[in-house]
Image (spheres, coloured by chain):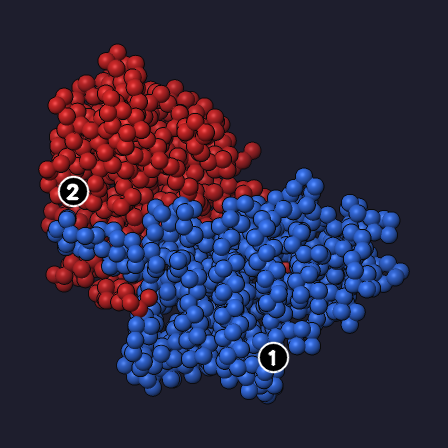
Chain colours: A red, B blue
Amino acid sequence: MPAPVLSRRDLDFLLYDWLDVESLTSRPRFAEHSRETFGAVLDVSADIATKHFATHNKKADAQEPRIGEDGRVEIIPEVKAALDLFSKAGLIAGGFDEAVGGMQLPVTVLRASMAWFQAANAGTSAYPFLTAANAGLLAAHGSDEQIATFVPAMLEGRFFGTMCLSEPQAGSSLADITTKAAPEDDGTYRLTGTKMWISGGDHELTENIVHLVLAKIPGGPAGVKGISLFIVPKYFVNADGTLGDRNDVALVGLNHKMGNRGTTNTLLNFGEGTHTPGGRAGAVGYLLGEPNKGLSYMFHMMNEARIGVGFLATALGYAGYQQSLEYARTRAQGRPLGAKDPQAPQVPLIEHTDVRRMLLAQKSYVEGALALGLYCSKLVDEQQTAADAESRSRAGLLLDVLTPIAKSWPSQWCLEANSLAIQVLGGYGYTREFDVEQYYRDNRLNPIHEGTHGIQGLDLLGRKVVMQGGAGLALLGETIGATVAKGLAAGGETAATAEQLHAAVTRVGETTAALWSTGDPALALANSTVYLEAVGHVVVAWMWLEQLLAVGERAGAFFDGKRAAARYFYRFELPRTGPQFDLLASLDRTTLDADPAGF
Amino acid sequence: MPAPVLSRRDLDFLLYDWLDVESLTSRPRFAEHSRETFGAVLDVSADIATKHFATHNKKADAQEPRIGEDGRVEIIPEVKAALDLFSKAGLIAGGFDEAVGGMQLPVTVLRASMAWFQAANAGTSAYPFLTAANAGLLAAHGSDEQIATFVPAMLEGRFFGTMCLSEPQAGSSLADITTKAAPEDDGTYRLTGTKMWISGGDHELTENIVHLVLAKIPGGPAGVKGISLFIVPKYFVNADGTLGDRNDVALVGLNHKMGNRGTTNTLLNFGEGTHTPGGRAGAVGYLLGEPNKGLSYMFHMMNEARIGVGFLATALGYAGYQQSLEYARTRAQGRPLGAKDPQAPQVPLIEHTDVRRMLLAQKSYVEGALALGLYCSKLVDEQQTAADAESRSRAGLLLDVLTPIAKSWPSQWCLEANSLAIQVLGGYGYTREFDVEQYYRDNRLNPIHEGTHGIQGLDLLGRKVVMQGGAGLALLGETIGATVAKGLAAGGETAATAEQLHAAVTRVGETTAALWSTGDPALALANSTVYLEAVGHVVVAWMWLEQLLAVGERAGAFFDGKRAAARYFYRFELPRTGPQFDLLASLDRTTLDADPAGF
């Protein structure tokens, strides 16, 4: 019996004891739901994830997708089998309206469901999540005909979706994409260009693939203002829903990655003439929404995707924590310090203090990150369904500020958790006999995609904390302040914890003001990654105080474990931010002034 | 033309400008040497490493050793070809006496030579380094006959060596090994038992393999006091030097690792009866030195091996730094902050401040670690060849204190450098198209083998800083104090740097005293890993002040680069130790008291 990849006990604590998701069922959108229906979704998710996703995680890593002799992408059959089960369970449509066959689940519950799959198998679970995001974008901005043509087929898992943003010469710099979309007389466009890093870009898992492609209409504005979004199906869809000819989208090659190998990642050529729809080259695309608004549509999806990356990082960290915990409890090695008798039996690893340090660190990272991810998901639910406009708006504002942290913090610290999991297992952890080395490789992707760590720092310090005259940062401070007030009222160790958080959040405000008081954006932003990391730690410290308050006075090992992890975070982790804020407040120019010639 | 894996410019600076290794040539052992002979060794090392080791690094990773149908270990042919060149260049014997065909190179120069191979190909370079360590141990403790039988053949590269310590149930806990060595009437022993994690344990790269095996003679003392060391050749060696029958050593399986795949790593059975020397089962072994002293012999080798692991981690970090630097200089992406024209050309990555941060961090880690490794190597030279006994003894004492840091610090921070190298390359860095992902995987081994990070912490705080009434720690403080005095005398930014180092080293002393004032070893050692990390940062800060002093007032990009990296380390890195010392001084019990039931 392998260790579970997540903890249902912890999820239930976070969802019900802390976030009170049950209260969402009083809102019209979720009226059909109850704690029982939420529980059923989590049950079926854990069941399918454990029995059908985790079971081929290692095999999909060892036998990554390849291009067969016929030019098609070959993927081990377990992937399609698992995904068919996922689709049949209705999970792609989990968050969609009942009108299109969805379950209308709260995002908070849906994310918890998804986390089971991410923890069980990062590679396989990427396909339906990408498809759901793609369908969501189509549903939000597509015409009725576009929606009818593509969305139901995607929600049923008959079509999968992709997002085609990057190009070989334009990774993070979307202003520099060169894929061209030339208008045709019939209202369609012909696309030509090359797209890089396209996850799920080609495969035989589904009947069809729906690419959402960023491209520029000739004559439009330069840079990001001239980017439009197009639907480019792999196969055309006839009016009756049957599939027609191949569109002019060609697989150029697969990227071979360190981890996350189960998700095929591709280089695609649009319009090179491999196929000739209507007798000539050019990939036929359908404009989604209005011209030149492609990036704004895509950004909505990318904000969700950032939360999703945070969850993926968290899930991988959680799975590694669980595996190393199981190992530490069962593997006997060495004796306590000071044990004199070499013939006494060896003790379980968890009896060694330093092993407990590594487990506490992991626990504080992965449970802190999970709390943050679910908190942000709840904000999405609030933004979408809160009764009054002001509540919706405040939730959206807070979510905007937290999004770069929800993406970057788990990507950094749950990767560190995976490293600690390897360390607990020692030499065994470094072998492919266990799963922790794969989690570590898989997780290393997360600080890169959907905006690198550095880009998240620029987003947080350069945009989010200054937007609307600093309203977002003020709201964050106010919200944390409310938690601090409850903590102070609780007395005892919780009050001391709250004081520590109060001091830290005060430094966030002071430091932000000091940075922007310079009037020099290059100087203010020089160490924005350090700012991102420091504020991230303060935010996760807040999540731990929130959890402590939800624990309250309750007795039992589970609650004592939460207390220990919170204590660890406040004593070993939060203090790391002191030197970071000092550095930022000093307006240090070391990185800004470093001469490229000196390296 | 790929980026070089090391910097000869930096090596020359460290060896000559800083450590003045040329002065060693005035000592009798090195009298035949000169800066020219040292340079020739470094030239040939860089040449062979670049042309014959780096060239198959990726292939050896992708096609790891496997067991063929005939039960033999199959390794890609480039490995043997490269190793034959290495052996023919006399490099296995580099540090050995001329009497046995060695070059009598100073350890400092030899380590610099070895680093070229480690940076070029961690997997392939492990074989000869292990063999040299094995031969060194044999030469130090073997009988004349044992030495004559094995050592020359190893130095010529005809035999390779292994170290067989761990067993499946006894990784770090050598007290628990159960391999048995039963004495025979002819003075030999018959060994039975299973050894795990044996690098180079079986292969066809050489005619023979010489295993050095820890085992217990029945009836001896329990625990580590009853461990003896045996020579167990794969093939017996006849009196005339020809090879005889197979000994009873059987390959059970290969370990499949995340990285470091080029080095075959094995599970070996001794004496299971696969082969029957003299007509019966049992691996024939020859006692090395005296009975029950095996661990003390092995520890001498393991101290060298720890320095070697530090160099391996450093070399991998250095290679990644060089590759990411080359990429940052040549890859254009994005525009400077505030650039308004989307049609202006993209700029090289190194123009972005956060990319420079990642390069400066790497530079400060890998050049700081290289300095530390070479400093410790110079201490070995001092210990072995200084004119007076007191100098030799002081060098040995300082080396004892620094060894756990020289092993652990590069293993932690040069791995972090590899992660930053991936980050500089972004998505490309995550693919196997570049080398940085392999460096990261290879380097993750280093915090594990030759004593985990946690074990190094216990060694430093539990043994090294308290031995001889704290003489080692006092000597470290005194030695750093001498550097601080020079720094203060230099004035300017160097003096400010020296003041910062003085404050940090003062905290090391205070914190150590506070920890041991408790009289409770379990409490004192509860956070010994944090202590290891904090003291490690102080020691590397010292290495940077040393480098600043060696730079002096000289002008030029290379020297400015050293200044920038030192500044980075003192502003971004050394301050990390503040909260660590605070935690340690508070005698925090969080990890000590954490209840295993709460996880």
Closest to the observer, B542 or B478: B542
- Point out residue B6 in the picture as x, y percentages from the top left corner: 44, 65
Query: Given the current orientation, which residue lies at the most extreme front position?
Result: A279
- Occupied quadrant, residue A370: top left
Taking the spot 47% from the left edge, 34% from the top edge, the residue there is A60
In the rendered image, is residue B468 in sight? no
| Circle 2: residue type | Val
Q: Badge 1 local density, few (<14 within 10 Å), some, or many (20+)?
A: some
> Is A357 left, or right, of A220 in this rendering?
right
- Occupied quadrant, residue B541: bottom left
- Point out residue A471 in the picture as x, y percentages from the top left corner: 14, 47
> Is A185 left, or right, of B129 in this rendering?
left
In the image, which disc is placed on residue B384?
Answer: 1
Q: Badge 2 local density, few (<14 within 10 Å), some, or many (20+)?
A: some
Q: Nearer the viewer, mark 1 or mark 2?
A: 2
In the image, which disc is placed on residue B245?
Answer: none
Closest to the observer, B507 or B347: B347
Count how many numbered circles sit on residues in the image: 2
Taking the spot 78% from the left edge, 63% from the top edge, the residue there is B241
- Point out residue B280 in the picture as x, y percentages from the top left corner: 85, 48
In the picture of the structure, the residue carrying the numbered disc 2 is: A224
Taking the spot 45% from the left edge, 30% from the top edge, the residue there is A68
Where disc 2 sits, the SS reads helix
> Is B175 left, or right, of A134 in this rendering?
right
Rounded to the nearest angstrom, the CA distance separating label 1 from label 2 is 66 Å
A476 up-or-down from A107: above or below: below
- Occupied quadrant, residue B496: bottom left
| Circle 1: residue type | Gln
